[in-house]
Amino acid sequence: MNTYEEAMRQLQEKFGNQDALISLSTISLSSNEQGKPVPAARLVNVYYEDGCFYTVTYATTDKVKQIEANPEVAICYIVENFTANGIAENLGWVCDERNKALMDKIRPIFAGWYNDANNDEDTNTCLVRIRMTKGLWNDAHKGIRNEIDFVNKTA
């Protein structure tokens, strides 16, 4: 198994088939007083599969508007010292036929809170995919530093 395959195995082990909480950072639509971009971070529940994180949210939220204006995002999972950059995309309504297979996996994993937080009948309830482009496992205490290139599939 090469280093990239090992990194993908670790991601699946840490995030696969479970509800994980990560920090998702986007770029705000408003600038600071000097006219420079302002980061915006929030915690989101995610489902992981094949180099992508998925979250269910609402199409009119600031995070979705920010993603639509600039799809470049950053994520952080502090517990395992994993950070990544990626491209986020609103995949549309959770009940759209093209989202069915993913939502059939996601709903049971998020079952403890999903129905209280979401209304699948509302077409603004949407699925967002974060396709990672580069990542880093970094644990200085254990001497681990593994840079991952998800585009070229190297680590």
Image (cartoon, rainbow, N blue to C red):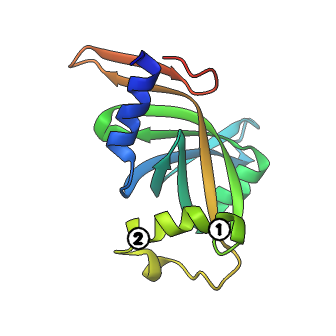
Position of residue 5 in the picture relative to residue 100 (left or right) = left
In the picture of the structure, the residue carrying the numbered disc 1 is 126
Give the label, 1 or 2, closer to the camera: 2
Q: Residue 137 sits in which quadrant?
A: top left
> Mark 1–mark 2 contact, CB under 8 Å?
no
Which secondary structure lies at badge 2? helix
How far apart are labels 1 and 2 at the CA level? Answer: 17 Å
98 vs 72, nearest the viewer: 98
Q: Which residue is rendered at x = 70% and y = 71% of the image?
A: 97
Q: Residue shown at 76%/52% (left/top)?
A: 68
Which amino acid does the dot numbered 1 rest on? Cys
Q: Nearer the viewer, residue 143 or 110?
A: 110
Q: Residue at x 57, y 27 (%)?
A: 150
Q: Position of residue 151 (x, y in %)?
A: 64, 26
Q: Which residue occupies the extreme bottom position in the image?
A: 121
Residue 40 visible somewhere in the drawing = yes
Q: Badge 1 local density, few (<14 within 10 Å), some, or many (20+)?
A: many
User: Percent x, y for residue 64?
Assistant: 68, 58
Instruction: Tell me the residue that label 2 is attached to.
Output: 108
Q: Is residue 121 above or below residue 47?
A: below
Callout 2: few (<14), some (14-19), or many (20+) C-alpha neighbours within 10 Å? few
Q: On the rendered structure, is 145 left or right of 65? A: left
Across and down, in percent, residue 13 comes to 33, 41
Picture quarter containing residue 8? Answer: top left
- Location of residue 146 in the rendering, given as x and y in whole percent from the top left corner: 40, 18
